[in-house]
Amino acid sequence: MPSMRQRLTSLITRRYPFYSGCASVANSTLVRVIGGRESGSVWSKVSGGEVLADLDDYVGRAAFFMGDLDRKITWISRQIIREGDTVFDIGANIGIVTVTLSDLVGSTGVVHSFEPNPLLAKQLLETIEHNQSTNIKLHPVALGAKKDTLELVVPKGNRGAASLVRNAVGDHCDKVEVQVAVLDELCQQEQIQAVRLVKIDVEGYEADVLAGASQLLSTIQPDAILFELNERTSDQLLEEPVMQLLQGHGYGFFIIPKNIMRMKLYPLNENIHRDDVGHDFLAVPKGEKFNEIARLVKAVI
């Protein structure tokens, strides 16, 4: 249960006017001092519904104090998604994006939500039931290039930074074994015919997720793929494994900069240096679909 100080603080912090920085503000020393340090789980209003948020966790604090983790992702989702769409939330955490997507696709659409951490999957299930969301299918698995059982490293205080590729550091991380499924196989099982949007937030495991989605990328070809690129191996962004894989399936890219007052995407090309961009990208099939999405997200071409 949040304290009165925390509730009053959230009334102020939720008026934050910018697209970037929600999580940083919610977890800042200033907000911790003003709001107090009471912990626990609380239902928090986000775009499209409510999520069960932990006040001692990085993502949970963003949900409670700001009503969002990343307003840029919410804005892009609202521009692209239509009622009746099928969408994927890969790395759903407590469901901030999942709840937004559920609201956008409506009763005739479907949200496939993937979260391998058993604790978060249980929390997300409570959120689905709380919101009476009949259009969300929860898959409590990780996704990868092959079926497997892997160790998920979960930083204490920031379960959203859990990773299948980063090592634990001292006593600051928990470890949990999780099941890894293959996205192509799940698409066959669910008889998926079209996908409007795929959002991927898997902390360095993006290439592995997409390696298990070759049929999806080549036959269904999702209209848009939102992903982070934190683990960089090349000075040239277009030479990164994730970029190379998606380019092989006919995708081009938009850069999602850390905008402050307004959203403004622009295409990624070989002349743009990695130090000049942020971590978020939108992949779209080249051609007519690229132009359609560009119009929807108001990209500068």
Image: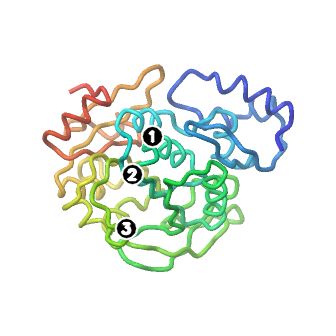
Quarter holding the N terminus is top right
Pinpoint residue 252: horizontal percent, then vertical percent.
21, 44
* SS for callout 3: loop
Instruction: Check disc 1 and report the residue beneath it.
Output: 104
The residue singled out by tag 3 in the image is 190
Rendered position, 146 above or below 215: below
Tag 2's secondary structure?
strand
Left or right, 121 with respect to 217, comes to right
Instruction: Look at label 2 and name its amino acid.
Output: Val
- Quadrant including the C terminus: top left
Residue 105 image-quadrant placement: top left
Q: Are marks 1 and 2 in contact (CB under 8 Å)?
A: yes
Distance between the alpha carbons at the discs numbered 1 and 2: 10 Å
Compute the Cα span from label 3 to label 2. 13 Å
Q: Are marks 1 and 3 in contact (CB under 8 Å)?
A: no
Characterize the local packing of mark 1: few (<14), some (14-19) or many (20 or more) Cα atoms within 10 angstroms.
many
Q: Residue at x 72, y 44 (%)?
A: 43
Q: CA distance from mark 1 to mark 3?
A: 20 Å
Q: Nearer the viewer, residue 173 or 219?
A: 219
Where is residue 75 drawn, in percent x and y?
44, 32
User: Does 224 sit above or below residue 125?
Assistant: above
Residue farthest toward the front in the current orientation of the protein: 108
**Residue 294 horizontal/vertical position (percent):** 25, 32
Q: Nearer the viewer, residue 123 or 10?
A: 123
User: Could you tell me which residue is drawn at 24 percent across and 34 percent down?
Assistant: 267
Q: In this image, 36 relative to 129: left or right?
A: right
Mark 3 or mark 2: which comes first in sequence?
2
Q: Earlier in the sequence, mark 1 or mark 3?
A: 1
Tell me how the rendering is colored. rainbow
Three-letter code, disc 3:
Glu
Q: Are marks 3 and 2 in contact (CB under 8 Å)?
A: no
Q: Which residue is mark 2?
A: 87
